[in-house]
Image (spheres, rainbow, N blue to C red):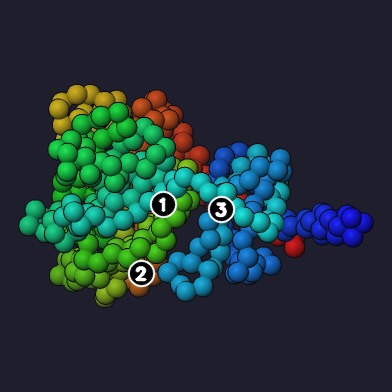
Amino acid sequence: MKRMILSLMVVFALLSCDKGQQITISNTSDSPRQGELVELSLSMLEWEEASSYRLLDEQGNEVPYQVMSYGEAVAQSILFPATVDAQSNVVYVLKKGTPASYAPKTSARYVPERKDDFAWENDKAAYRMYGPALAAENPSCGVDLWLKRTEELVVDTFYYNELTLGQSYHVDHGKGLDCYKVANKLGAGGVVPLYNDTLWVGTHYDRYEVLEQGGLRSVFALEYDSVRVGDAYYTQRIVITCDAGALLNKAVVSYQGEQLKGMKVAAGIWLHATVDNYKQDLKGNWIAYAENAVSDAGIPVGRNYISVVMPEMEGAQVIDQTLIAYRSYTTGTPLTYYFGGGWSQWGYPTDDEWFAATAEAAANLATPLTVTVIP
């Protein structure tokens, strides 16, 4: 009995010594951050591939995290949602242990059953871009926006109900709908070359690659083989990152081909037939648009919103019924911008609230959270 008691005392002593690794998140901005994803390289941690870990906040509550590999054979980093007041620090602790499971908040997938769509979503909104099987319909390289009013993932359900049950996703059945029109335009945040005052809108993607499919972040790439700009042709690759809780997707685009003098890259928002309410803030690096949302049944369903943030944008203007943000571009280099949409029935009741959220998101991107680790 004494031996057993001594053994238990040793075990408890060892457990109490496992204080874990302290991860400090610092917010130097004047804006509080709520559930914003932070990422840190595994090289910053004492990380053992064969071990499992739990992440705890300052109150001892478990926090979900995701291990990222970005298509590599070996894990590269972890990311998790951090909540930090303005001008404050918080500490999270990473300890060995079995983490709890959690419901995924992002998804990205190729949709062969719907003419090669590529669709993705988070808890804010859903999106899709068009693939090769739609070539006969002359689709654009623009982005389609699906409105949703639930944190649940809805893309798979919407496609299944549309294609199998005949329940149209162009009508709201309680969780949202697709009432946005892309046509042969940029839609809700598409990107194209801008040259000689012309938006060179391309067509469907040719290949896709899913780099991460996770509960907190999904990452994928789309490639385009023949993007016309004047008399020249380019290849294009765009890598899109969709984060849980994020207002905007991150997009990194690059073009390969000859360098044309004066060539720019523009990301934009189609204003549709009747221009409604839009704003642009050159200093804040963003543009945004609000308009009436109407289902295919002709039923008004509130307001839908779209925003684009382009760091170091050089200007904004309306071309061909499209509000764009643009900057100069050198071929072969990556250009990063952000885009996203929302709905008055899910989090942003008024235009002004959406515009304010866009301004805040742009400011937060300019002042990222910082991470330090104490082993």
The residue most toward the right is 2
How many C-alpha atoms fall within 10 Å of the one at disc 2: few (<14), some, or many (≥20)?
some
The residue most toward the front is 1
- Amino acid type, mark 2: Thr
Q: Is residue 111 visible?
A: yes
Mark 2 touches mark 1? (CB < 8 Å): no
Q: Which residue is mark 2?
A: 330
Instruction: Single out the mark in the foreground, 2 or 1.
Output: 1
Alpha-carbon span between mark 2 and mark 3: 36 Å
Pick the front one: 47 or 311 = 47
Instruction: Single out the mark in the foreground, 3 or 1.
Output: 3
Q: Is residue 271 left or right of residue 289?
A: left
Which secondary structure, mark 2? Answer: loop
Which comes before the other along the chain, label 2 or label 1? 1
Which secondary structure, mark 1? Answer: strand
How many C-alpha atoms fall within 10 Å of the one at disc 1: few (<14), some, or many (≥20)?
many
The residue at 38%/51% (across/down) is: 107
Give above or below for 102 relative to 337: above
Q: Which residue is mark 1?
A: 242
Give above or below for 333 relative to 135: below
Picture quadrant where residue 236 is located: bottom left
The residue at 15%/31% (across/down) is: 296
- Where residue 55 appears, x then y in whole percent? 64, 52
Picture quadrant where residue 159 is located: top left
Alpha-carbon span between mark 3 and mark 1: 15 Å
Q: Quadrant of the N terminus?
A: bottom right
The residue at 20%/45% (across/down) is: 182
Q: Is residue 93 left or right of residue 209?
A: right
Q: Which residue is mark 3?
A: 65
